[in-house]
Image (cartoon, grey):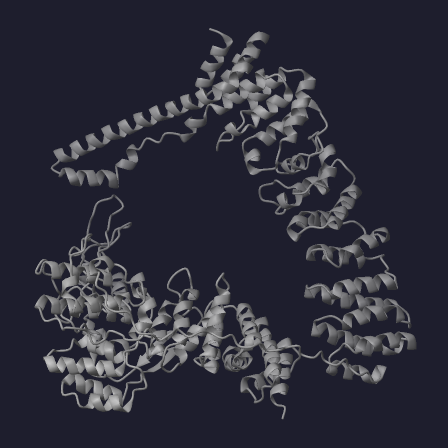
């Protein structure tokens, strides 16, 4: 057998050590032959390994199949049915007979081939490329270190050093190289050969990713000085601690056993700080500097001063500690530099430290403080009022220690302070006229012009019914299709493609009803009867499957206390726990789950009668399962379906809109009813209710008189509607604690029209399924003259899915151009859209501008609802203020002030509540807007905060707003 055949056989065993043995036995000529054949052999080796894996998996599957058959035969011998035995197999014993085949078998050829190449390929660079080639980078394939080192050790010493350098240069500091042994191999070769590590930053990062042993590691004297230069070291060691539970700590190693002087480490840390970086990248070096604890040094003052202005907070704090250490005395220029740097940082701790440094310098100085005047002037320029106020107190305290020249320097800087602080400096430094407040550059733009949707005649009824019954997504497609179905009997052709319509218990989609209408018209009496529950019940059973810990099905056993708790919890949800008296007859067993059958209570006990279906269609879902506008659309389909089965369809519908606004011309509706009376046609109840809701709010007196002359009951209903249209009262109830959802309320005395009463009622509090939100784009057509009611029905869908409130933007936009009063529902829709932060944030803000342009914005109420959203929902103030400012600059500034005047009383902290930065920002923005519009009139909640003692940002902002609003 040749050398190549021996290598092939060894690779097939997946044993890298065996391959190493075979390689070491090869002669020079055989090595060259193996090296020549290795690369073409990769594909064959991979395929052979995959074939071995597939064969092993087939054997395992065959063994599992035999075990299953034996189990089923055994159970059938015991009298168990075959289907039951199969089910029990998959529920339990199957897991005990599984034969897992290691997926690693597919790649176990990689390690042996790496060893073969390392021992036979000629050049060191070629071997380095071979070891890290992409074909070998499969998951879970680690370097076989011991066999690799054996074959590499047989090579010449210089060749080994070259390989160590080449392999080190191919490191990329990736987790894969660290985990698969590439890093370990490269580092071990460097240690064994004694070669100097190449100047390669990823090599340093890879080294610090391993456990430190600096006392015995020959690489330490080369790589420790490079720790402070290589990018990525700080990020790798960001979580390193000297007291790490694992015992692996580079901090401990560097402070206890570093092969360099401690001063070298300190200088390295300072150089790393000066190079810059994020707080995360520098965290390790800050900890190392603290552990080294260098003595304060006058020679390093300049370096530490350079770190104060822009270094990350922990680095700046470290530098400040070293500058304030014992034995370090700063000159006047250095104090000024340090104070100026600290006072303009964002961290309040460092700002306060700057003032403390100013105090310390004053104590150490003599009677002349002129050298500190520039630092004091820098403090006056700080944006923080607290810093300014404290610097003013310092200036007053030390006023006598300034010479006339120093005092003049202070006076020149005083003008930038607010008037109240300038007044406090006047007795000590003389009168100074504060700088005039910069003129407000606010210039309101022109409110955008929004083109209102045209109110054109609706297109005629559809005639291609079979080809369009699934296309109800168009706004008017549903109405035109129903109109065409009723008007054109000849167009009622069967659909080309049908669904398992009659197998469904309920039809929740208008497309299902449209298909049913076409199929019923083509072949009457094809629908099988639908079993119905007794009158007054909406029964719904849910069974929870239960298994014991052994896998056997059994009845649940509950103690009386547990049973009572479950029954009480279900009762709170409107569910009755049936058969509970039998659940405590045995002792409970650990590991059981219980069979429960909850039964819904009678609907008549939970819902007002106006929510019950008025059409005798067994396919209608419960009103509790779909939103009221959606259910209204289904109800109209159901009554047309019922009339079709009875053969009593009217010649046309009353509710078909005549205008693209969704309205019906009142004269046209009167004419339709006159035709009904003339032909003796009975109006469909839901059709009549929908027609009434589509009447405009303003009707010509002549049309009202014509309606009064109608003689039918439907005519009388229309006449009453035109004389006294129902006006539901709407409101939004908010929970008292954060996390709850707003509850829409609609109050209306029964009108006598069940279809109308079902819509003028409270929407469901939650959105239990996607069925609740079906056909939302068409809801405005159901209630074209009652946009506030539509808004109320949309509120439960604000957080219906992952899209959030922004998904309702188009619906809210449409309501701006509809008819009817607006109230808390419209205000909530518009206000919550202001908090959107996603890609459609700009479009959501346009809803507010459109509402202003169409005079449909209840601005003050919008502010109140927005305040509740900020307090109780996940709505952030920053995007809200950004949206309001943008709208104000586009011409809606007066409405924005009305919004803020409604928001502040609701949003501001109440007595006993803790204020935060958001409250202050809201007041500061209100001050700006009040200046833009010249607002006047006290807001009691703002005045109450302004009257408090203290000088916090909240109180100062409240005082400014209160003063502005109180001006005559």
The relative height of residue 151 versus residue 924 in the rendered view (above or below) is above
Could you say where residue 506 lies in the image, as x and y percent from the top left?
19, 61
Q: Residue at x 42, y 73 (%)?
A: 829
Report if residue 112 is visible in the image: yes
- Expressed as whole percent of the image width and height from the top left, the position of residue 117 reads 55, 19
Name the image quarter holding residue 657.
bottom left
- Could you say where residue 53 lies in the image, as x and y percent from the top left? 38, 25
Please state the horizontal and vertical placement of residue 151, each as a whole percent of the image: 58, 17
Question: How many numbered circles are shown?
Answer: 0
Q: Is residue 373 above or below residue 679?
A: above
> Where, by quadrant of the figure, is residue 595 drawn?
bottom left
Q: Quadrant of the C terminus?
A: bottom right
The residue that appears at 16% across and 60% down in the rendered structure is: 518
Image quadrant assignment for residue 475: bottom left
Foreground residue among 769 and 736: 769
* Residue at x 10% of width, y 71% of height: 648
């Amino acid at each position: 057998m040749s050398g190549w055949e021996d290598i092939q056989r060894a690779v097939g065993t997946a044993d890298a050590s065996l391959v190493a043995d075979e390689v070491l036995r090869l002669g020079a000529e055989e090595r060259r032959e193996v090296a020549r054949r290795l690369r073409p052999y990769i594909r064959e080796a991979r395929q052979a390994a995959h074939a071995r894996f597939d064969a092993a998996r087939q054997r395992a599957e065959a063994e599992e199949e035999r075990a299953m058959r034996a189990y089923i035969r055994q159970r059938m011998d015991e009298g168990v049915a075959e289907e039951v035995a199969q089910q029990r197999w998959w529920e339990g014993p199957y897991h005990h007979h599984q034969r897992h085949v290691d997926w690693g078998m597919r790649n176990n050829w990689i390690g042996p081939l790496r060893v073969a190449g390392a021992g036979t390929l000629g050049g060191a660079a070629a071997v380095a490329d071979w070891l890290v080639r992409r074909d070998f980078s499969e998951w879970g394939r680690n370097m076989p270190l011991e066999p690799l080192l054996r074959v590499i050790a047989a090579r010449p010493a210089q060749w080994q050093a070259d390989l160590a350098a080449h392999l080190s240069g191919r490191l990329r500091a990736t987790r894969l190289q660290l985990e698969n042994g590439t890093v370990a191999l490269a580092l071990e070769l460097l240690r064994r050969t004694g070669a100097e590590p190449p100047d390669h930053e990823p090599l340093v990062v890879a080294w610090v990713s391993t456990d430190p042993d600096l006392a015995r590691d020959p690489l330490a004297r080369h790589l420790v000085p490079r720790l402070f230069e290589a990018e990525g070291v700080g990020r790798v060691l960001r979580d390193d601690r000297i007291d790490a539970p694992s015992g692996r700590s580079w901090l401990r190693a560097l402070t206890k056993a570093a092969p360099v002087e401690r001063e070298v480490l300190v200088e390295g840390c300072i150089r790393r700080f000066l190079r810059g970086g994020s707080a995360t990248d520098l965290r390790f070096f800050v900890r190392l500097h603290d552990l080294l604890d260098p003595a304060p040094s006058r020679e390093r003052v300049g370096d530490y001063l350079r770190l104060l202005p822009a270094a990350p907070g922990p680095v700046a704090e470290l530098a400040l500690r070293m500058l304030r250490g014992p034995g370090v005395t700063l000159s006047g220029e250095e104090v000024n530099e340090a104070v100026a740097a600290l006072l303009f940082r964002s961290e309040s701790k460092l700002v306060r430290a700057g003032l403390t440094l100013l105090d310390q310098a004053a104590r150490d100085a003599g009677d002349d403080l002129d050298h500190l005047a520039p630092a004091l002037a820098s403090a006056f320029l700080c944006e923080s009022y607290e810093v300014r106020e404290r610097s003013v107190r310092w200036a007053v305290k030390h006023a006598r220690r300034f010479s006339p020249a120093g005092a003049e320097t202070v006076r020149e800087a005083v003008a930038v302070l607010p008037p109240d602080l300038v007044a406090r400096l006047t007795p000590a430094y003389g009168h100074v006229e504060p700088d005039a407040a910069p003129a407000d550059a606010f210039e309101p733009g022109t409110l955008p012009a929004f083109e209102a949707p045209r109110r054109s005649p609706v297109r005629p009824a559809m005639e291609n019914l079979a080809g369009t019954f699934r296309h109800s997504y168009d706004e008017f497609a549903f109405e035109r299709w129903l109109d065409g179905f009723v008007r054109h009997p000849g167009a009622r052709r069967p659909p080309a493609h049908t669904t398992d319509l009659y197998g469904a218990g309920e039809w929740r989609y208008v497309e299902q009803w449209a298909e049913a209408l076409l199929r019923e018209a083509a072949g009457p009496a094809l629908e099988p009867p639908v079993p119905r529950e007794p009158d007054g019940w909406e029964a719904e059973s849910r069974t929870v499957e239960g298994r014991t810990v052994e896998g056997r099905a059994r009845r649940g056993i509950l103690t009386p206390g547990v049973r009572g708790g479950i029954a009480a919890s279900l009762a709170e949800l409107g569910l009755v726990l049936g058969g509970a008296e039998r659940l405590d007859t045995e002792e409970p067993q650990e590991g059981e789950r219980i069979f429960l059958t909850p039964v819904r209570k009678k609907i008549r006990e939970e819902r007002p009668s106006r929510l019950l279906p008025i059409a005798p269609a067994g396919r209608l879902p419960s009103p509790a399962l779909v939103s009221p506008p959606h259910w209204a659309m289904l109800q109209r389909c159901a009554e047309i379906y019922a009339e079709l089965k009875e053969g009593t369809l009217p010649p046309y519908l009353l509710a078909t809109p005549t205008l693209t606004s969704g309205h019906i011309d009142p004269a046209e509706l009167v004419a339709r009813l006159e035709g009904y009376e003339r032909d003796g046609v009975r109006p469909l109840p839901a059709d009549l209710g929908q027609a009434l809701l589509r009447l405009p709010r303003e009707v010509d007196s002549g049309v009202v008189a014509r309606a009064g002359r109608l003689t039918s009951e439907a005519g009388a209903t229309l006449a009453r509607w035109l004389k006294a249209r129902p006006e539901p009262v709407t409101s939004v109830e908010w929970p008292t604690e954060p996390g709850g959802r707003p509850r829409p309320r609609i109050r209306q005395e029964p009108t006598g029209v069940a279809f109308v009463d079902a819509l003028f009622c409270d929407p469901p509090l939650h959105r239990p399924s996607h069925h609740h939100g079906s056909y939302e784009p068409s809801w405005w057509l159901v209630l074209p003259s009652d946009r506030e009611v539509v808004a109320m029905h949309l509120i439960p869908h604000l957080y219906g899915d992952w899209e959030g409130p922004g998904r309702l933007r188009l619906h809210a936009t449409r309501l701006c151009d509809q008819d009817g009063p607006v109230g808390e529902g419209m205000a909530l829709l518009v206000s919550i859209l202001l908090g959107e932060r996603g890609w459609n944030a700009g479009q959501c803000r346009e809803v507010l501008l459109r509402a202003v342009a169409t005079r449909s914005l209840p601005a003050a109420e919008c502010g109140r609802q927005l305040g509740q959203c900020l307090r109780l929902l996940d709505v952030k103030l920053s995007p809200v203020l950004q949206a309001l400012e943008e709208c104000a600059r586009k011409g809606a500034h007066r409405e924005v002030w009305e919004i803020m005047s409604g928001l502040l009383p609701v949003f501001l902290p109440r007595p006993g509540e803790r204020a935060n930065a958001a409250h202050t920002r809201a007041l500061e923005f209100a001050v700006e807007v009040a200046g833009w519009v010249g607002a006047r009139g006290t807001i009691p909640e703002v005045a109450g905060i302004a009257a408090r003692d203290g000088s916090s940002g909240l109180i100062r902002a409240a005082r400014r707003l209160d003063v502005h609003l109180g001006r005559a």
